[in-house]
Amino acid sequence: MSDLIILLTGGLVAASCSLLGSFLVLRRMAMVGDAISHAVLPGIAAAFLASGSRDPIVVLPGAALMGVLAVFCIQWLRQSGVQEDAATGVVFTALFAAGVLMVSLFARHIDLDLEHVLYGEIVFVPYDELHLFGKWLGPRALWFVGATFALNAAVVAIFYKQFKLCSFDPLLAASLGVPVTFFHYLLMALVSLTTVAAFDSVGAVLVVGMLVLPPATAYLLTDSLARMIGLGMAIGVADAAIGYGVSVALDASTAGCMVTVAGVALALAFLFSPKHGILMRPKIKRA
Amino acid sequence: MPLSDVWSDPNVRWVLLGCMLLGLSGGVIGSFTYIRRQSLTGDVLAHAALPGVCLAYMAIGAKSVWAFVVGAALAGWAAVLCVGLLVRRSRLKADTALAAALSVFFAFGVVLLTFIQRGEGGNVSGLDAFLFGQAATMTAGDVRAMATLSAVVLAAGVLFFKEFKLTGFDPEFARSIGFSAGRIDALLMSLVVVTVVAGIQAVGVVLMSAFLIAPAVAARCWTERFGRMVALAGVFGAVSGWAGGYAGTFSHQLPTGALAVLAASALFVLSLLFSPRCGLLARAVRRFVQRRMTRAEFRRAAVGVKKP
């Protein structure tokens, strides 16, 4: 039972991440995903401190807001003439340092330790249960990861056309009257929300792996956005499942194993993708 | 601890010295990566150092700075090679390649870390410190190793200043007059790796990238000359290292690395606001003055029109 719950949680996290990550990869914003996943740490710490609980209902919005704020700061620094890579680097390291400081200062009060935030412990997910009106509803994390996934899927499904257009041709999108900036920040808000929802299970630092690796793998395998998203989600879920199996077999960090497996999958696609793999390309040319 | 007692306590002296050296070399090397727009490569290298350090620890079975340098250098190299391979031989873009290499290497490091933590009890806390740093536990020996590494990095930075500058600003021209851009790139990446390894104990893997970015960006606000920028970045780095180390002496709960990074970030914010050249305040003043002058000119022109 607990295996099933862990697999389900990991799978939902992976699916959420791949869904949004596809757009990040296409918009060349993979490192912004990295920045967001670091920047939410002070938000998580502040929310824990303010509410005194680990209840994700309190933690989620506060921390997600922090991620959007980070993106906003990066954008603003770029407009004031700071190079893009340096702007990203300065903002997220500063926020992350603030988070580390807060966590180590108030660690005693908020039942939160750095390792947990950074690497997550999906293994404990089944034991933190949600009770509502005296009824047993199953593990708490599962509910929140599931809700996040449902929200992501709904938003992307409703605005699929707009997201697609903004990713491939923002100028055309703007000229057709699509509010490009709004969709940019909507995507960033979803990414921060997902990062925060996932931090309990895979940890804030390794979320970036789940955001980037499965979509990148899918990107090497197909040329259609719809297929890339579907394939990315399937690959992400498979990575999570295999990673969990490996971690049980080796008795090692679950999140670490999941992302390492995702990396192996990317390496395989890089080498053997029928269309873009470096080992397959010469054959196609010869034919 | 009052300011006057800082240098009389040997332990504190070592910690402060170590943090300052670290900031100094981080600022100098960070300036070189900044002009190449490779600031985030430092971030990747810092994360990629983790599996290297873990493997070195597993191979030797003890903490040894020099083994860590070798391990981290090899891992950092592998990461840079992976990024290059992904960018050149596949359709993935640079940002995706960076994020992919960063997360996979770090994840692998985390896996190795769990192995090490399971292995034996005694040295676990020592390795934990690599992630966020624990400057307060640094000994004279550690600082001596850090000082050596920083000195090597600084010497190389001074020695190859011209080469780094040239390939950074105009790689085409550098190639045309016979500099091997690939080799100089490789040297710079190695220097970044060494800086990261030097900083692992004081600020930790995750925060080390900040030392490579923030002082350089802050220095960029104050000058248009590259030589001055490098020197200023070194000073900013050393000051923030000192500030972090000093603030860390007040309580053992305070993480020195995070404090130093926050100090560097604060310097950046101050530079962004108040530097005369690109500072936002200066820009606002300039805009205000310009508007006044334009208005005055208009008025004069209007007066001129009235009186034929």
Image (cartoon, coloured by chain):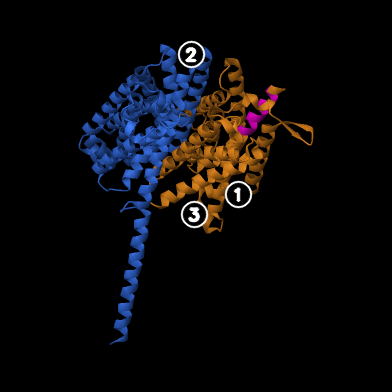
Chain colours: A orange, B blue
- Give the residue at mark 3: A171
- The label nearer to you, 2 versus 1, is 2
Looking at the picture, tell me which residue is in the foreground, A46 or A198: A46
Q: Quadrant of residue B139?
A: top left
What subunit carries mark 3?
Answer: A
Name the residue furthest right: A134
User: Subunit of mark 2?
Assistant: B
Q: Main secondary structure of the magenta part?
A: helix
Residue drawn at (50%, 26%), measured in percent from left and top?
B107
Q: Quadrant of residue B3?
A: top left
Res. A161 mark? 1
**Quadrant where the C terminus of chain B is found in the figure:** bottom left
Numbered disc 3: secondary structure = helix
Residue B187 pos. (x, y %): 29, 29
Residue found at x 31% / y 82%: B303
Sequence-wise, the earlier of marks 1 and 3 is 1
Read off the magenta span: A3-14
Task: Tell me the crowding category of disc 2: few under 14, some 14 to 19, or many 20 or more residues within 10 angstroms, Cα based.
Answer: few
The circle drawn on residue B271 is none
Q: Position of residue A24 (x, y in %)?
A: 52, 41
Q: Secondary structure at mark 1?
A: helix
Q: Which residue is mark 2?
A: B122
